[in-house]
Amino acid sequence: MKSKLTLRMNEDVKERAKEVARERGTSLSALVEDYFRLLSGEGSSDEGDGSPEDGESAPALTPRLKEVHEQIGSPPPEAPFDEPRGDLTEDERQLVKAASEKHA
């Protein structure tokens, strides 16, 4: 259930917050709600916030990480990759492969 909340703040802060909301393609209300969710340890109210499908809670993305995710999009369906991709030397391929095995 949604309810109304009245906030009082400095006019400059309010205008900057509106600008940030516009840049992120969201409303000021959603921006404030997401901030309070982050403070309380919940996740973002947006769908597709990176929560696992099995119902476990995932750490909320910071605003900067959310922005990066929006710019690069979701990983391709075949991710995680079994083999390093891209124009790498053999040494680089071995390093990537060893690191992925170590951290798997």
Image (cartoon, rainbow, N blue to C red):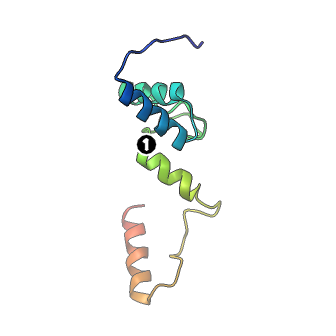
Q: Residue at x 58, y 59 (%)?
A: 75
Quadrant assignment for the C terminus: bottom left
| Nearer-the-camera pick, 9 or 69 | 9
| Residue 41 seen by the camera | no
Judge from the rendering whether residue 71 lies leftward or rightward of residue 13; answer left or right. Answer: right
| Nearer-the-camera pick, 52 or 102 | 52
> Which of the 4 image quadrants contains residue 38?
top left
Tag 1: residue type? Answer: Pro
What is the crowding at mark 1: few (fewer than 14 residues within 10 Å), some, or many (at least 20)?
A: some
Q: Position of residue 91 (x, y in %)?
A: 39, 87
Name, please, the residue furthest toward the bottom: 90
Q: Position of residue 54 (x, y in %)?
A: 58, 38
Q: Residue at x 53, y 80 (%)?
A: 86
Judge from the rendering whether residue 89 lies leftward or rightward of residue 80; answer left or right. Answer: left
Q: Position of residue 51 (x, y in %)?
A: 53, 39
Considering the numbered disc 1 on the image, is that residue within a helix, a strand or a loop? helix
Q: Is residue 85 above or below residue 61?
A: below
Q: Residue at x 42, y 67 (%)?
A: 100
Residue carrying label 1: 63
| Nearer-the-camera pick, 43 or 28 | 28
Judge from the rendering whether residue 43 lies leftward or rightward of residue 9; answer left or right. Answer: right
